[in-house]
Image (cartoon, rainbow, N blue to C red):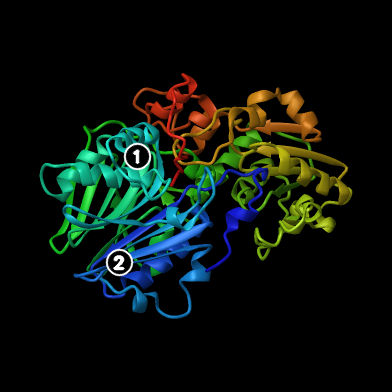
Amino acid sequence: MSKNPSATFDPQEDKLREECGVFGIFGIDNAASLTALGLHALQHRGQEACGIATFDGKRFHTERHLGLVGDNFTGADPSERLPGYISIGHNRYSTAGQTVLRNVQPLFAEIGTGGFALAHNGHITNAYTIRERLVKDGAIFQSTSDTETVIHLVARAREGGFIDRFISAIRQVEGGYAFVGMAENSLLGVRDRLGIRPLIIGRLGDSYLLASETCALDMIGAEFVREVDPGEVVVINADGIRSYRAFPETASRPCIFEFVYFARPDSVVGGKSVYDVRKRMGERLAEETPADVDVIIPVPDSGVPAALGFAQAAGVPFELGIIRNHYVGRTFIQPTQAVRDMGVRLKHSANRAMIAGKRVLLVDDSIVRGTTSTKIVRMIKAAGATEVHFRSASPPIRFPDHYGIDMPTTEKLIAANYSLADMTNMLEVDSLGFLSIEGLYWAMGEKYRTEGAPQYTDHCFTGQYPTALVDRDRKLAGTPQLSLLTEVA
């Protein structure tokens, strides 16, 4: 078993933390092997833990680890130790508390209808409240994951078969989520009623699969079928695909951060190429916040498409002025405080030949706390830049997230507490600029807050949360809650 990465995680790193990745497949003999490949493609969505569960027609098999997919599911064929024709998998990033093995997914339980395995991307915003009620009623929880709340709700439902009970459970939870599960010789998936968290359906020969992103389909040579609709429950078994409507149809509100940062650039989300959208963000950024500079440099890797779009729109050379070391892991960069302080230099090196004597404009996908951004600016200045300008390819982040993103509290978000002039001074740059919310929507081919136009879950920029935040409101009201910390899947 690999070392627990959370023990070496730097909480001050100026990047949003990915959510989680889920994958499931039905109707193929080496299901676990394909699930491992799918999780590998989704590794960017969670790097702290991974797990796979399978069903062989008689028994469930599970294997869960702390660490990366490649460290735990390589070598011998995973299907040899995890036999079955149905499989689900999960890449985990926990956004609260410490990652421990009991919280690694998929979670499994024997309930009244038989075995049930479940994996989850997102966050249930009334999990504390439901958990408190269940514990008072005698429920015994084995983890601190909000995913287990759904398992208990399914187990306690009394009417109908498994699917009826599962839908009954889903209707009791609020938030943004995508679940994949296994039960009754079936693979199942569900998206929250607004489609905040992504989930797609693919096909490989006669087999169907579920995944967080299309890049997982590309990894195994599968074809894209469609997205799971908001509020839809899909059941895949020997009879094909059946669809159930867990909630009344409503306008979807996908998470806007899939386009800004989370999704892999080669994925397609909501019918849009993530790479193309990010380039358009850079194009609009150049129009909204121009600068008289000699070179455009991306902050790797997430700032590359936007920086390329900015450079093309502005007619300024694009150069890789920062070289990222892809072989530095979290464990390596954390052994002492002295090494921790030089973490940026271990991960990023200045390409002095592209910087010295030039007016440099840095482009990144977003600015969260500002800590790493400041270190990168200092590194560029030390490499001989005569001026350093900074641009964010997304609007200022002023509000925390409650749907599965590890977003700092308002007090730690630099844009929530300081003016543009103050942030410019704090980042030690000659100028600072952000993409407007209207520009972000433009990059996606939409119009912001226009009647009839698609809207997104953009609360981190606007403060407009699309669902009830039951647990947060109880906390703000001072209502006593369980002492156990509910983690985000």
The three-letter code of the residue at mark 2 reads Thr
Q: Is residue 467 left or right of residue 295?
A: left
Q: Is residue 264 visible?
A: no
Which one is in front in this view, the residue at disc 1 or the one at disc 2?
Answer: 2
Q: Which residue is mark 2?
A: 54
- Spatial CA span between label 1 and label 2: 26 Å
Q: Is residue 19 left or right of residue 390?
A: left
Label 2: few (<14), some (14–19) or many (≥20) C-alpha neighbours in 10 Å: many
Q: Which residue is mark 1?
A: 195
Q: Nearer the viewer, residue 90 or 265?
A: 90
**Percent coordinates x, y for residue 244 in the rendering:** 18, 44
Q: Residue at x 54, y 49 (%)?
A: 98
Task: Label 2: state its secondary structure.
Answer: strand
**Percent coordinates x, y for residue 334 in the rendering:** 71, 56
Q: Nearer the viewer, residue 382 or 484?
A: 484
Numbered marks: total: 2
**Percent coordinates x, y for residue 114 in the rendering:** 18, 57
Query: Is 304 situated above or below 450?
Result: below
**Percent coordinates x, y for residue 53 in the rendering:** 33, 64
Sequence-first tag of 1 and 2? 2
